[in-house]
Image (cartoon, rainbow, N blue to C red):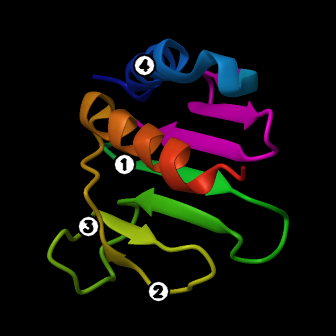
Amino acid sequence: MTGIDKLKIARKLILTEILTEIKEIIIDDERPFLKITFFKGLVLYIRYNDYEEYSYQLIFSQEPLDRIRYDNYDDLWNIKTKPHHYHPKGEKVAIQSPMTGDPKHDIPLLLKRIMEKDLPK
């Protein structure tokens, strides 16, 4: 499955679950990424490439490290889920991640995280 195929799956899952929370959604099929801007001010970037790499980054503000990020772009982190890892908000470290790079598995987990904890009230 190509990166753009995965983005289309992610987009469909997101629109089905939280359409009313979304201000803008943009899909770029050349670089493949999906950018979602929420009414509450957060921005979510989802990237997949054709080499089984992915990232999900939720940006809270333009302040340094004011984001969370799940990805597998490197395997530098000595954790059980290597190369899949999670960069917590405000931290330079990486910890274990429940993500796998499969949008059907990951997007519901990501949406649950966003809707339960990370969208400001």
Between disc 2 and disc 4, whose residue precedes?
4
Dot 1 falls on a residue whose secondary structure is loop
Dot 4 falls on a residue whose secondary structure is helix
| Disc 2: which residue | 93
Q: Is residue 116 rendered to the left or right of residue 104?
A: right
Q: x%, y% of residue 72?
A: 35, 60
Circle number at residue 13:
4
Quarter of the image where one finds residue 2 = top left
| Disc 3: which residue | 83
Outermost residue to the front: 121
Circle number at residue 53:
1
Q: Residue at x 40, y 61 (%)?
A: 73
Dot 2 falls on a residue whose secondary structure is loop
Vertical comparison of 107 with 66: above or below:
above
Q: Residues within 10 Å of mark 2 (few under 14, many from 20)?
A: few
Vertical comparison of 114 with 49: above or below:
below
Residue 111 sits inside the magenta stretch: no
